[in-house]
Image (cartoon, grey):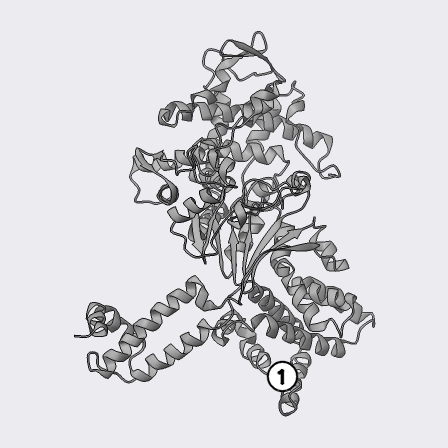
Amino acid sequence: MNTIEKRIEADLRVLQLLAQSFPNVAAASSEIINLEAILNLPKGTEHFMADIHGEYEAFLHILKNASGNIKRKVKELYADTLSSEEIRELCTLIYYPEQKLEIIKNNIERGDLNDQLFYSKTLLQLIRVCQSVSSKYTRSKVRKALPPEFAYIIEELLHESPSDDDKQAYFTCIIDSIVQTGRADAFIIAIANVIQQLAVDQLHILGDIFDRGPGAHIIMDRLCEHHSFDIQWGNHDALWMGAAAGNDCCIANVLRLSLRYGNMQTLEDGYGINLVPLATFAMETYSSDPCDLFGPRLDKDDTTHNEKTRRLIAQMHKAISIIQFKLEAQMILRRPEWRMEDRLVLQHINKEKGIYELDGRIYEMKDTFFPTLDSEHPFDLSFEEAELVRQLHHSFRVSDKLQKHVKCLFTHGCMYAIYNGNLLFHASVPLNADGTLKEVDLNGQRYSGRELLHHIGMTMRSAFNADTPREDKQFAKDYFWYLWCGQDSPLFDKDRMATFERYFLQDKQTHEEKKGYYYLLRDNAEVCDRILDAFGVKGKHRHIINGHVPVRVAGGESPVKAGGRLMVIDGGLSKAYHNTTGIAGYTLVFHSRGFELIQHEPFESADDAIRRGTDIVSSKQIVELSGRRLRVRDTDKGHELLSQIEELKELLYAYRHGIIKERARK
């Protein structure tokens, strides 16, 4: 028995299953030819983004313009035939087809435009752009991206050329028919959406969709409909997932952060969380307290919050902060294995003297008004606080939209992922001082590196699984809070979260949070290589890609570290970070030529983009260019296709030697 026959004998069951799809030599041969052709297509374009933090308008615009890639293609096609203004108008039409068409139709009605000429010219331009962005894909893949209503027409137009004399009349007739039947608007919208979809093959979100900005729910709505995306959960995502699971500590933190940034839209408009009980409690309990330290952090030009609203937010902010510290103390006492006793902060407040006493030292407090704090039992909720927590808990648990979005996060997400030689995770991998992987306790078992992140992900999922044993489910729910602020959490990786100290203590030295060794050692190439080895990432050009810590570009910090092995792509998309980073976000683009880092400037608004054609100003930084153009053969998908080809070749051998009988295709 030769080698191939031994393989066939071992794989016979697999080959018999494969034979159901490819029942004869002709079918198997055709599929091999098809797969070989796909292997030689250019690699699809991947986009990596991190730390979106609810900044939905900027995020959606970047998604629509493919981080500037669509405008680049339009310029390449029309630089010699269209003016800058015409290119800008065409791009805006691709990004916002419904809204832009309304403006254009108003111009047509006023007689500023000839409708027949506009539609004919625009349809031809859009077809050409679509041909460009679809050129690296198979007809089959492009066909799947087409809307059923126009699939046949678009496919015909994509594979014909109006410059071909033999086909010109045919091509022109199709365009004219679209206009004459009144379907031009619908067709433009459809093809613009196809262009947007085909411009980016895979979208990677490296965590932190939630908090700070006003539209995390809008971002999640868009992502849940996206054709191909994945997410590596961030600490803020885990916090909201914990809130959805019913973890009261997570719920309190979600509310506190939302109030801190004056962001009520996601809670109220997005998820229907009833904040009236919190507002009522806060107004009654802190009616005589100015709550000056708890005013929301708003843009300097904010006009949506009047003084009355700001005061109410400050009262609610303080109220939920005190409740949070009590709930966290109860969690810490229930989970002594987490060794977080230093966060039992309320017991050190001396209400009578208005001071904070810790380890024999006295600290001056910024605020000494604690009407719900019982000095004898500092961790107990008052009756009113307990009732409020019960109501808030119910509101989070019954939010259908929040539960739907968390399900989407689980469907498309994980703690880490490996794509085409790139290791993706949000924040860190716990390390020892010498750069070796740190073993971390997880519910009585110790794990490090890849195993640690895998088992954390499984624990998170178990909080939502109906078949999880009760005790394990309770641990899983509790663990979401540890992920948010626990020392050995790969989503936090600091010695403590000093929220109480920042809020209440004058001494700024008490505000310090010491970062874990990953952040201290991540610029070391050997350490990065050790992590990549531990996760089984192969290849000469492998990388770690993460976010979490904003890159201070204005201060000269580079997002590319460890000799190119690590790329940190948190460029501060959220407005709250613009002053920290000096820019307004990054997109890392990995196409067939290599890596480019796209640096974005602040985005005005979608309305401004539609009316004035403004775009996000972006600049490119070449991170790494490939010596040759990468093909599908060089990707993870290519490796899968090569395995399929080998199996099909075995099936061919089995057919030709009578090991498996051929059948006629039905």
Q: Please state which of residues 8 and 621 is positioned toward the viewer in this rendering.
A: 621
Q: Position of residue 535 (x, y in %)?
A: 39, 48
Amino acid type of the residue that numbered disc 1 sits on in the rendered structure: Ser
Specify the quadrant of the image occupied by residue 647.
bottom left
- Establish if 369 lies above or below 323: above
Question: In the visual, does 655 lie left or right of 221?
Answer: left
Q: Say whether residue 171 is visible.
A: yes
Is residue 285 among the parts visible in the rendering? no
Residue 502 drawn above or below residue 397: above
Q: Nearer the viewer, residue 146 or 6?
A: 6
Locate the C terminus by quadrant. Answer: bottom left
Instruction: Quarter of the image for the N terminus: give it.
Output: bottom left
Query: Badge 1 is on which residue?
Result: 161
> In the figure, 580 relative to 619: above or below?
above
Q: Quadrant of residue 60?
A: bottom right
**How far across and how far down the image is residue 349, in percent?**
53, 13
